[in-house]
Image (cartoon, grey):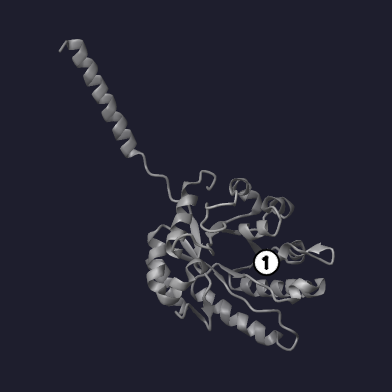
Amino acid sequence: MSLNLKKSLTIVALAVFVASEIVSCTPPKPAKVVGLQLWSVKDDMKTDAKGTIEKVGAMGYQFIEAAGYGDGKFYGIEPAEFKALTEANKLTFLASHTGQGLPDSVKWAETMAWWDTCIAAHKAAGVSYIVQPWMGEEGYTSLAGLKQYCDYFNAVGEKCNAAGIRFGYHNHSEEFKDLEGETIYDFMLKNTDPAKVMFEMDLYWITEGGKNPVDYFNAYPGRFELWHVKDKAEVGAGPMDFKPIFENAEKSGMKKIIVEVEEYNFTPIESVQKSLEFLQNAEYVK
């Protein structure tokens, strides 16, 4: 072997070694902060809440939103114990879905007392957001009834604020229908106090309701602090086009994204894992 060839091979080998060292020293990209609405695995939570939380934490979700509050407990577990369970699995107990229907004047005090108990339980569990995901028929049949709901939500939001918790409302598709010349969702945005009521936008249901999320971000910037990232089945399974929505995240006021799966091509646990993998790999998700 000639001296020049020997030198060339040495230089190539050295270059390969240096390149491999650079690659090996490059830190991995940090995981994106994605949460899971536990309604996605509701049957698993009923049969084995502890084991399900362990699986959710192990697959890489960073926080959860509950859908199992009742009688001062979460999925039948005391608030402090449920908080400890989530934290032991590297999860934050960020948010919770619960609520009460619109009370009349007779039941107002009773309903507010229910909220006092509810808020105290959530505070003990370290929750940052309480979200009501429904309204009774009064909110869909007249603007007068809808206005009563808005006033009610403002009152609940004020109570939550006093405990250091943010209150919000989660939409389905019905809120995008017109009622007496007004779109229900727009009326709610206009008649709730932004300091007391935020909105958790379900990206799938708003599109099912015939509206574009970005139009609402432009019309009501900063009001949509939480998003439910949902598709027909697993996130990314179609038909949702998430890219233009995420490109307007800052305008919306979005603080956290939460996966929800309600129809499945796989088991619920597999479906939420595939949804997380899709969002982790999507370049437009920051």
Which residue shows up at 51% across the image and 57% down it?
Answer: 234
Examine the image and state in which quarter residue 91 appears. bottom left
Which structural element holds mark 1?
loop
Q: Is residue 104 left or right of residue 31?
A: right
* Residue 148 higher or lower than 214, as above or below: below
Q: Residues within 10 Å of mark 1 (few under 14, many from 20)?
A: many
Q: Is residue 101 left or right of residue 277?
A: right
Q: Position of residue 160 (x, y in %)?
A: 62, 73
Which residue shows up at 45% across the image and 52% down it?
Answer: 277
Q: Position of residue 241 (x, y in %)?
A: 60, 48
Can residue 22 be seen from the camera position used here? yes
Residue at which label 1 appears: 197
Q: Nearer the viewer, residue 36 or 275?
A: 275
Farthest bottom residue? 106
Q: Amino acid at mark 1?
A: Val
Which residue shows up at 36% across the image and 39% down it?
Answer: 26
Q: Is residue 230 left or right of residue 49?
A: right
